[in-house]
Image (spheres, rainbow, N blue to C red):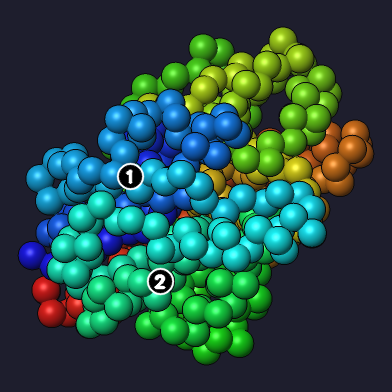
């Protein structure tokens, strides 16, 4: 069987499913062997109260584990990994030390890497392993799947420099948004492949999980949640019901907001399908414009939800309604316009599956296994 290695900061069995989980699932369903290589994890992560420590990452550290048939997990847990020290001087001084991250012991995983046909790198510290893995396996196909915009993620500057150094050396740089495509286009190997869906999870009937027939407004996500915008919206529409999934430690200050921790994605699907409006209420930071094509936007769209989003995420989608953060009237109008929108007009034809995307990532390797 062909074998693909995913190098990512995500944990293989996390409840919250990121794009890399779905890509691995798509390759697995196509008959590939999977190695899910979790990196960007060290005792520094523990000091920063990293959410991945909700899973047994220390117990599984640096050993190969069989998750299921043809699917293995390896948690590369080290003494350190590069972190932003919030000081130009400290970041400059620490760069030579943090650069050693890519040379830390592999704990016998080299044999698995040498047997792979395809490597898919996430936009995180695994990029510092690029040269080392190319030496171990010079014949595989190398893909950089840019799930996040590195300059916007407030990483150590070493990672920004590493991306600039190695991006052009990949066989393919696959990006999910036009914003990131423009930033990296000069490398010449960049292609736009927006996020996909497991459409089959959405297509079967399910019961309505909402307890009331009120307009149900839904937010699903974890990072950069704009709680002020959501609470303002809930105050403006006290008769509406607002539901928030996945925002860590969020305690709503408004009675018509219900907040839940991360759940298995399959448990959230009914909430997506039976919602009336989807929220993309993200706080601004430089580079947030890449979220115009976030995974959440495609999930909402496939469920034919009108979407409410801040102005800095403006795009040409007809079913997205925009507000100015902090502006009561624009938030009110965006919600009213979303509520009044004819959901049959939401364009779902361009929403891809993850199976569509992996064909591009695998390239001729997929043709050889067809």
Residue 117: x and y, percent? 20, 72
Q: In which quarter of the image is the C terminus?
A: bottom left
Residue 227: x and y, percent? 74, 30
Tell me whether the residue at label 2 lies in contact with that at label 1, contact meaning CB atoms closer than 8 angstroms.
Answer: no
Is the residue marked by circle 2 packed among few (<14), some (14-19), or many (20+) residues within 10 Å?
A: many
Residue 236: x and y, percent? 83, 23
Whole-number angstrom distance, CA of label 2 to CA of label 1:
17 Å
Q: Earlier in the sequence, mark 2 or mark 1?
A: 1
The residue depicted at 86 percent of the width and 46 percent of the height is 324
| Quarter occupied by residue 77 | top left
Residue 198: x and y, percent? 33, 49
The residue depicted at 77 percent of the width and 24 percent of the height is 231
| Res 75 label | 1
Q: Is residue 7 left or right of residue 300?
A: left
285 or 130, which lies in front? 130
Give the residue pinned by disc 2: 130
The residue depicted at 23 percent of the width and 82 percent of the height is 139
The residue depicted at 51 percent of the width and 69 percent of the height is 175
Which secondary structure, mark 1?
Answer: strand
Using the image, determine if residue 30 lies above or below residue 257.
Answer: below
| Quarter occupied by residue 289 | bottom right
Is the residue marked by circle 1 packed among few (<14), some (14-19), or many (20+) residues within 10 Å?
A: many
Which secondary structure, mark 2?
Answer: helix
278 or 66, which lies in front? 66
Say if residue 155 shows up in the picture. Answer: yes
| Res 150 label | none
């Amino acid at each position: 069987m062909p074998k693909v290695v995913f190098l990512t900061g995500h944990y293989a069995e996390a409840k919250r499913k990121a794009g890399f989980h779905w890509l691995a699932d798509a390759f697995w369903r196509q008959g590939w062997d999977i190695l899910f290589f979790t990196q960007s994890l060290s005792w520094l992560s523990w000091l920063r109260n990293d959410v991945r420590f909700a899973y047994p990452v220390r117990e599984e550290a640096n050993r190969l584990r069989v998750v299921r048939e043809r699917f293995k997990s390896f948690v590369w847990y080290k003494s350190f990994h590069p972190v932003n020290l919030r000081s130009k001087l400290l970041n400059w001084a620490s760069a030579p030390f943090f650069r050693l991250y890519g040379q830390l012991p592999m704990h016998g995983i080299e044999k698995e890497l040498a047997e792979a046909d395809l490597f898919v790198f996430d936009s995180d510290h695994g990029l510092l392993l690029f040269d080392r893995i190319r030496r171990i396996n010079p014949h595989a196909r190398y893909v950089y799947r840019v799930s996040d915009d590195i300059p916007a993620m407030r990483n150590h500057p070493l990672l920004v420099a590493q991306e600039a150094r190695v991006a052009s050396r990949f066989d393919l740089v696959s990006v999910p948004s036009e914003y990131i495509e423009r930033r990296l286009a000069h490398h010449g190997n960049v292609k736009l492949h927006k996020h996909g869906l497991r459409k089959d999870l959405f297509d079967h009937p399910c019961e309505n999980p909402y307890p009331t027939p009120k307009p149900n407004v839904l937010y699903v996500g974890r990072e950069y949640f704009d709680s002020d915008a959501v609470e303002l919206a809930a105050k403006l529409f006290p008769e509406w019901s607002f539901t928030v999934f996945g925002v860590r430690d969020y305690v709503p200050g408004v009675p018509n907001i219900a907040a839940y921790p991360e759940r298995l994605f399959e448990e959230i699907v009914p909430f997506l399908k039976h919602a009336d409006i989807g929220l993309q209420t993200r706080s601004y930071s430089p580079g947030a414009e890449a979220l115009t094509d976030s995974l959440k936007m495609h999930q909402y769209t496939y469920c034919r939800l009108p979407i409410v989003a801040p102005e800095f995420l403006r795009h040409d989608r007809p079913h997205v309604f925009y507000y100015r953060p902090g502006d009561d009237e624009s938030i009110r109008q965006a919600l009213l316009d979303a509520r009044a929108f004819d959901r049959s007009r939401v364009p779902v034809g361009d929403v891809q599956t993850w199976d569509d995307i992996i064909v591009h990532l695998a390239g001729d390797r997929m043709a050889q296994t067809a």
